[in-house]
Amino acid sequence: MKILHVVASYKPAYVYGGPIMSAAMLCEQLVKTGQQVQVYTTTANGATELDVATGKPIDVDGVPVTYFPRKTKDHSHLSPGLLKAVYRDAKKFDVVHVHAWWNLAVVLACFAALKRGVPVVISPRGTLSPYSFQNKNTAVKSLMHRISMPFLKKSHFHVTSVHEQEAVKAVVTGKSITNIPNFVKLPPLKQNSDESHRSDVFKLLFFSRIEEKKGLDILIRSLKLIKFPFQLTVAGSGTEDYVNELKALAIENGVDDKITWTGFVNEEKFNLLNNNDLFVLPSYDENFGNAVIESLSVGTAVLISNGVGLAGYVSINELGWVCENNEATIATHINNIIGTQTTELDRIRQSAPSIIYRHFEGSALVKKYINMYQQIITS
């Protein structure tokens, strides 16, 4: 098969977090199976641009990636060069797979491919949900949604969880919808020992992009209700204004001395995850949650809100706890875990890595993606 992936940002623009890593891993796995894959993307790298050659394919970990300059330096990612290339080249491919929504690079590429008569797969990656419509630029999103609805109805959808599937169905009905988990980079599998590595201070970890929907504000407010000695590490990056707002919130709640802000962590992330007792992600809305799988892959249990796409998976496989995303509930769970459920932490540390490898090993997942493409092409 010949598959064109269109995404507003691609490696090494790691500032955008999990979604670009999942898209990149999908492309890399497809190439390994012999599929003919190309990626069209922009030079977006937050407020700056990637220092890469543009307009011609570059080998990025085995995947031919063409970067196009963008005209806007914000999340609209307008790139006339990318749009022109998609319209010119779309018919060379069996299917065009676009990632995320609400940015012009992807939305216009979707329109162009459909105009050329090529089937389109949309992976919303959390951007098409009732929460998304209520959070930021609501008027613009509403207008864009009305304009794009005819194209959305002609597209196929790929979602990464039951939670996201229900969210997408609430706002649009496409030609089909397929639920396949994200690819997540995993460390080498190892068996953890029976010995606990906990100290007298319970170590909590928030490991994610720092933005409003992640619920870090709720976690910070919950800390004043925790009855045991603890330390929270916040690993991730966000806008300077919002991070400062959260630091002020910590001071206001009298817990600033209990929080360590490490900034963005990449290469050492698995050591960081392994060295903490509990990973906490109280997101308002999360289509999947790559970091949840990363944490469990080293055996660190998770406490996540029911707004995280993997909440059902965590509950069914008994790999942590699921809660409402409010400060009282989060604090109650943390107090119970520290006070009475440390044996559960030890059980999860030993059992979780092998469970995660069984469910998220790459070669098994890629077959599901290939089957999805084949069904879309034949339909």
Image: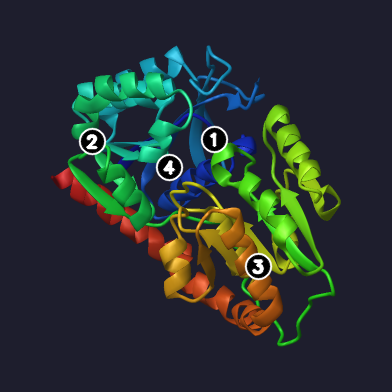
Residue 347 to residue 287: above or below: below
Task: Give the secondary structure at mark 1.
Answer: loop
Q: Which residue is mark 2?
A: 155
Q: Nearer the viewer, residue 163 or 323?
A: 323
Residues at circles 1 and 2 in contact by the CB criterion of under 8 Å:
no
Q: Earlier in the sequence, mark 3 or mark 2?
A: 2
Task: Give the secondary structure at mark 3.
Answer: helix
Q: Amino acid at mark 3?
A: Ile
Q: Nearer the viewer, residue 267 or 34?
A: 267
Q: Amino acid at mark 1?
A: Tyr
Q: Position of residue 19 (x, y in %)?
A: 51, 43
- Let me know if residue 187 appears in the view: no
Q: Position of residue 88 (x, y in %)?
A: 31, 18
Q: Which residue is mark 3?
A: 334
Front of the two marks 1 and 2? 2
Q: Which residue is mark 1?
A: 10
Gap in angstroms between the C-alphas marked 1 and 2: 22 Å
Q: Earlier in the sequence, mark 1 or mark 2?
A: 1
Gap in angstroms between the C-alphas marked 3 and 1: 36 Å
Q: Earlier in the sequence, mark 1 or mark 4?
A: 1
Q: Position of residue 183 (x, y in %)?
A: 47, 55
Front of the two marks 1 and 4? 4
- Image position of 365 (left or right of 314): left
